[in-house]
Amino acid sequence: MPFYTVEAFNVVIIGSGLAGQSLALRLADQHQVALITKRTLTDCASAWAQGGIAAVLDPSDSIDAHIADTHEAGAGLCDPKATAHVVNHGPKAIQWLIDRGVPFTRDPVSPVGYHLTREGGHSHRRIIHAADATGAAVQATLMEQVIAHPNITVLENHIAIDLIVSDKIGHPGKGCVGVYVLDKAKDQVKTIGAAHTILATGGAGKVYVYTTNPDTATGDGIAMAWRAGCQVRNMEFIQFHPTCLYHPQAKSFLISEAVRGEGGVLRLPDGHRFMPDHDPRAELAPRDIVARAIDFEMKKGGLDCVFLDISHKDANFLQAHFPTILARCLELGIDITEHPIPVVPAAHYTCGGIATDLHGRTGLTGLYAVGESTCTGLHGANRLASNSLLECVVFSEAIAEHIAQTKSVLPAALPAWDESRVTDADEEVVIAHNWEELRRFMWDYVGIVRTNKRLQRAQHRIRLLAREIEEFYANFRVSNDLIELRNLVVTADLIVRSALRRKESRGLHYSRDYPQSSARARNTTLTPRSR
């Protein structure tokens, strides 16, 4: 087998969301950094984030209150050290973004000079935002700086296939030394060596038919880390956002939680406001409670959707605070100043993921993970609204600090990708069919409400699909769709295996067979078998 390295970098970051870009900027003054993204720099879940970033900025708020709100939403499963670490570093993270030039919405009346909104589960107004397109504003600001930095090499339209682990290629020790990447433009697999590799690949929302996530959210980092030998944790906790726009032309369009934070109410078709029937916090209850309430009312009434009504607010207020939502709804014939918005729950956020410590380290030397692909312990059994972007920025700083204190040793020559025993795929329809089947039964059997029987049915189908996909992978050249499908089926398997292990209902995992919560909250940790 030929050994060579096409390219080598001190740091390779896989993923171009807020976690990946902020980490690249923190490291680039001292390191040569490669930023790998499977589409363009703008194709990521971070750019779709509407609501904002949670942090204690107002003098009337407190660190203790933010920590308490996070623990309350996390249903007793948040790690105390991780939660305290993120919340305490929140104000500093926001200041870093402000210093970078992010145009957060200002408010001259506010004691901090910026408008702070409130979202479900928060006891105070602490969500700093850029109108209703915070993620897009943050990404646009950082992207300009990433592109301009001489030490950052951006590899767009490159999709990672698998991590290169030293002991699997005959090198001493057990660590990550690089990654195999498909250059989609050239249809060529590259071998890229790295002293430090970071997975910032986002979540796995595309494992479900209905999701607020972009098409890139296929669980790539989670699956690659699992195949490389890393533990994953709490994969059963998939957050379903309560309010995704229900319209045949509105694929994956999220109606921000801030709409409810600013007074929006949920109604049935007859106008009845139903959330007070389910929780005393009504529309400001945590997402898992609101999503289950909507699911209950839809199934009870045989409804296609429910309605989010904020038409009682002044039209100028809505234009100022929700310009993106207002414009998109108007395009579809819905004037939110006059009429309620049809909404349904949709898969939104992967709360579990690759197990990491407070430095972002995985169980594999040289491999870090950050953002939605991880389980740091912050989110517990249910993520508190707007804590996710905060986690990205705080942990990008933690990883950068650890790498700065770690010796960078580039790996020796690495093996080239071996295509000697594969051919071009004869029927791509196999991939498309398996993709649709997987996402449909995951929605039907592993959704907002679960049973053992549904989970077992899903597991049976996953095993059949996994064998078929691995056979296809072993015999044909890789493509973007095949790589993503391979990762999706691994991620689906981890979700179902984790869900079957949890003999209780907690946070985002609700089981009809085990409707009560156990007295003690425990993590679900899966460890790969030695290979």
Image (cartoon, helix red, strand yellow):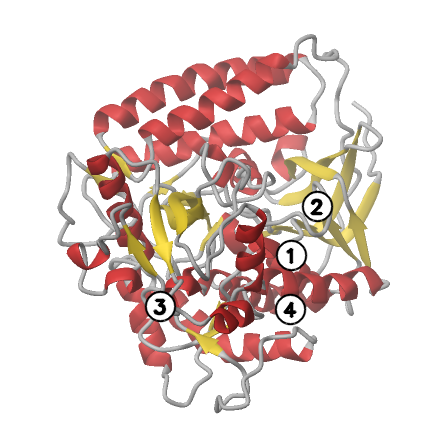
Task: Tell me which amino acid carries mark 1.
Answer: Gly
Between disc 3 and disc 1, whose residue precedes?
1
Picture quadrant where residue 238 is located: top left
Q: Is residue 370 in view from this perspective?
A: no
Residue neighbourhood size for the residue with mark 3, other residues' Cα within 10 Å, grouped as few (<14), some (14–19), many (≥20): some
Query: Mark 4 touching mark 2, by CB under 8 A?
Result: no
Residue at x 62% of width, y 49% of height: 44
Judging by the rendered image, the residue that carries numbered circle 3 is: 263
Q: Nearer the viewer, residue 152 or 307?
A: 307
Indicate which disc, 3 or 2, sits on the residue closer to the N terminus: 2
Which one is closest to the eye, mark 3 or mark 1? 3
**Closer to the camera in the image, 227 or 213:** 213
Pointer 4: what residue? Answer: 405
Amino acid type for the residue under numbered disc 3? Gly
The reply to whether residue 152 is visible in this rendering is yes
**Residue 317: where, in percent of width, then height?**
49, 73
Q: Nearer the viewer, residue 233 or 462?
A: 462
According to the picture, the residue beneath numbered tag 1 turns out to be 20
Position of the N terminus, as image quadrant, is top right
Which numbered disc, 3 or 2, marks the residue closer to the eye?
3
- Which element carries disc 1, helix, strand or loop? helix
Residue 127 vertical position relative to residue 217 in the rendered view, above or below: below
Q: Do residues under tags 1 and 2 come within 8 Å of each other at their CB atoms?
A: yes
Q: Which residue is mark 2?
A: 37
Q: Is residue 344 above or below residue 408?
A: above
Q: Is residue 515 left or right of residue 41?
A: left
Earlier residue among tags 4 and 1: 1
Q: Secondary structure at mark 4?
A: loop
> Mark 4, mark 2: which one is toward the viewer?
2
The structure residue drawn at horizontal position 73% and vertical position 54%, both measured from the top left corner, is 409
